[in-house]
Amino acid sequence: MRKLKAERDGDIAVAGPDLARSLTELGLIDEYRIYLHPVVLGRGKPYFAGPRPPLRLMAHERIDEDVIRLTYVPA
């Protein structure tokens, strides 16, 4: 992943708590974009399955009538 990040310009999107946690532990995530949808689910994996990294909110944007995107960077 370090090689891929060094070779590419622009964004590399990652989904899923397991991969995101691994990349967070390696210090490879520059920005988190969390999309809030007003849906209640009964089960699932938390996005931050381990300890939540320290984050700083940088932006928020209404994407759709019912969706908000929150942009965080590591603090």
Image: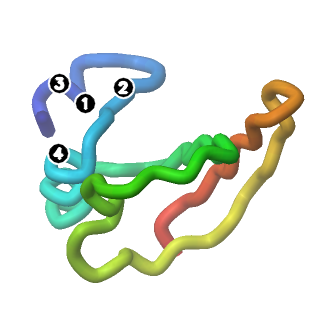
Asked whether the residues under the numbered discs 2 and 1 touch, taking CB atoms below 8 Å apart as contact, a structural biologist would say yes
Q: CA distance from mark 4 to mark 3?
A: 15 Å
Judged by depth in the image, the label closer to the viewer, 4 or 1, is: 4
What distance separates the C-alpha of mark 2 from that of mark 3?
9 Å
Mark 2 → mark 4, Cα distance in angstroms: 13 Å
Q: Horizontal and vertical percent for residue 31?
A: 50, 49
Residue underneath mark 2: 12
The answer to the question of whether label 3 and label 1 lie on touching residues, with beta carbons closer than 8 A, is yes
Up the image or down, 17 lies above or below 74; here it is above
Q: In the displayed orientation, state which residue is furthest to the front.
A: 42
Q: Position of residue 67 (x, y in %)?
A: 75, 36
Mark earlier in primary sequence (2, 4): 2
Q: Which residue is mark 3?
A: 4
Callout 2–callout 3 Cβ contact below 8 Å: yes
| SS at badge 1 | helix
Q: Earlier in the sequence, mark 2 or mark 1?
A: 1
Residue 64 figure quarter: top right
Tell me what residue is drawn at x 26 percent, y 57 percent. Answer: 45
Q: Amino acid at mark 1?
A: Lys
Which is in the foreground here, disc 2 or disc 1?
A: 2
Residue type, mark 3 in image: Leu
Q: Where 70 sits versus 35, above or below?
A: below
Disc assigned to residue 19: 4
The residue carrying mark 1 is 5
Give the class, few, some or many, for how many residues have Cα within 10 Å of label 3's Cα (few <14, many ≥20). Answer: few
Mark 2 or mark 4, which is nearer to you? Answer: 4
Identify whether 8 is placed above or below 57: above
Q: Secondary structure at mark 3?
A: helix
Given residues 40 and 31, the one toward you in this image is 40
